[in-house]
Image (tube, rainbow, N blue to C red):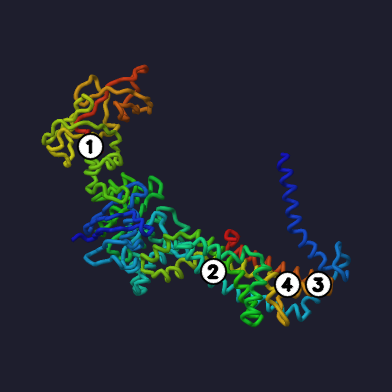
Amino acid sequence: MKNSKLLILITAMVFIFLIGPFIMIFLTSFSSDAIMRFPPKGFTMSWYAKALNIQMFRTTFWVSLQTGLLATATAMLLGVPVAYANIRFNYRGKGTLELLFSSPAIVPGMVIGFALLRFFVYVSNIPIVIGLYLGHTAILFPYTVRVVSASLRNFEGDIEQAAISLGSTPLHAFFAVVLPNIRSGLVAAFILAFITSFNNVPVSLFLTGPGVATLPIQMLSYMEYYYDPTISALSSIIIVLTVIVVQSAEKLLGISKYV
Amino acid sequence: MAFIELKDIDAGYEKGKPILKNFHLSVEQGELVSLLGPSGCGKTTTLRTIAGFIMAEKGSVTIGGKDYTNVPPNKRNIGLVFQNYALFPHLSVFDNVAYGLRRRKVSKPEIAKRVADVLHLVSLKGYEDRLPAQLSGGQRQRVALARSIVIEPELLLLDEPLSNLDAKLRDEMRAELSRLQHQLGITMIYVTHDQIEAMSLSSRIIVMNEGLIEQSGPPEDIYEYPATPFVARFVGFDNRIDGTLTRLESKSVHVDVQGVEFISTRPSPNLSKQDEGKSVSLYFRPDDTQIGVEPGKNAFEVTIDFSNYQGNTTQYAMHLGSHALRAVVPGKPIADGTDRTVFSIPPDKVIAEKGVR
């Protein structure tokens, strides 16, 4: 009994630490106070109106959305075949290659950001938007490989061989039999990768520049000048959108087992 | 030339580490052959080599007179049935069965007709729209079977198709497979580690061990006249006694085991007059052993290590010299306190085979 009380306490604390900040942000976003402060005073929706009306937020939201979608799509196109090859085949140097593929998830974002900055901007002189897109693709790739691998591991190879014995080429069997059955894994990989891109700060920080910023970077620089609840309102919008997307994907496809 | 010929095959999952070495196999058209053996004996490797999922490093695969050695699996027209059914989870029963026909560009009305026919054949009419997840294990395996025979394959390969089913279903499916084989006359190669399954289904059993064929023959031969110590053990001749061949006659053989004379009326065809004076091994089943009355021919005094009362029968563990033996005898254990007693074995229940050395 003593143990279970301790367990409840620890669980409660974990929840407070995880959910607490969100609740704070959510509450302050309705505060009529001009400074972000807790506990909030009064009630107003005006910060939401302001957040949605600031042109830079709108522009950078589109930059984030486009970068996220394009980079995720590219990372998926690269990640699915790599995951498939790693699950189905044995080849020399497989372990090394797997480590290399996952390195962007292990190396700190600041380091990747700086390295990409050197490479894209100083050496290759690539336009900022393209550099941003390529940088995000690189950091999303290991996520797609990992999540798709997990769902492929649950899929029996015999099913594919059955399709081949019935006359499918290996490529046809992949599209006709493998892909439809790892659909939830693919959606999970897509959502996880997209959210990772959309939230990314360290890599974006290095790869954005004059005139081009992502939403999180824009929010950071806004906070340097104004400390009003606009950011709280914007953050609340993003949180609610994320919850809706993840919840509906979970309801439809049960993606949580792959993440 | 046989319908299926594997010649000088080296094959395995890793290059340079073949599981099958210099492997030969021939199967006649219409045969139902079982590959029987413990896991790791190479039976599944053989099946996969025939199906084309393992490409042989060396040797040739011929089916129906055509060289298939380098033909990819999707061009072989071989039906495959897996232990775990391997149905397409996202497709209905109808679409699962129709899969192979669609790949063969068969016309729509023709597909509808052939799928209906084959579902009738495996008694699954009315299940067309179900998904595999909505079927029982036995029904799934019948769908898998229907899916593999609807393409009219040249031969059907079955990889432990019944081992995921419970005992009652297994009996039913075994009967069904037998019926299908007679009805369709299709050549089948059946992989199993279950002796009873192999015995009851096959026209020929091939016992495999460590990538080699130990013995090949009709079920009766395998069961009654195992040719190697491995096969003997595998079909339940658990007891082995080594002795010296003293006299070989046309239908009997005399063996001296530590001064006791044994007679076997089942000498192996491998034995010849030249083996007289050499070592031979005698094999017999635990349940053929009897409690003897007095020492004499085929009777031997043993030390009982322990007895285990099982109701109808009693199981004894004992030893004769250095040989550990087992016996299963009807009735209660012999009186307590005796650790030495006489057992005997009827001459027609003992196999004599060349000695193992």
Cα distance in 3D space between marks 2 and 4? 26 Å
Name the residue furthest top: B337
Q: Which mark is residue B355?
A: 1
Q: At which x and y percent is residue A137?
A: 60, 73
User: CA separation, marks 2 and 1?
Assistant: 60 Å
User: What chain does badge 3 belong to?
Assistant: A
Q: Is residue B303 above or below residue A17?
A: above
Q: CA distance from mark 3 to mark 2?
A: 36 Å
Which residue bears the numbered disc 4?
A: A216
Look at the numbered disc 4 and give the secondary structure of its residue: helix
Rendered residue at 14%/34% (across/down):
B276
| Amino acid residing under circle 2 | Gly
Q: Quadrant of the C terminus of chain A?
A: bottom right
Relative vertical location of residue B94 with respect to residue A17 in this rendering, above or below: below
**Looking at the rendered structure, which numbered label has been put on residue B183?**
none
Residue A141 lies, in percent from the top left, at 58, 69
- Residue at 38% in and 45% down: B167
Mark 1 belongs to which subunit? B
- Residue at left offset 24%, top offset 20%: B293
The answer to whether A9 appears left or right of B357 in the picture is right
Residue A79, labelled with which disc? 2
- In the rendered structure, are the residues bearing label 4 and label 3 in contact, judged by CB atoms less than 8 Å apart? no
Among numbered discs 4 and 3, the one appearing first in the sequence = 4
Tell me which amino acid carries mark 1. Answer: Gly
In the drawing, what numbered circle is on residue A223?
3
The residues bearing labels 4 and 3 have C-alpha atoms spaced at a distance of 11 Å
**Residue type beneath disc 3:** Met
Query: Do the CB atoms of the residues marked 2 and 1 lie less than 8 Å apart?
Result: no
Marks 2 and 4, the one that precedes in the sequence: 2
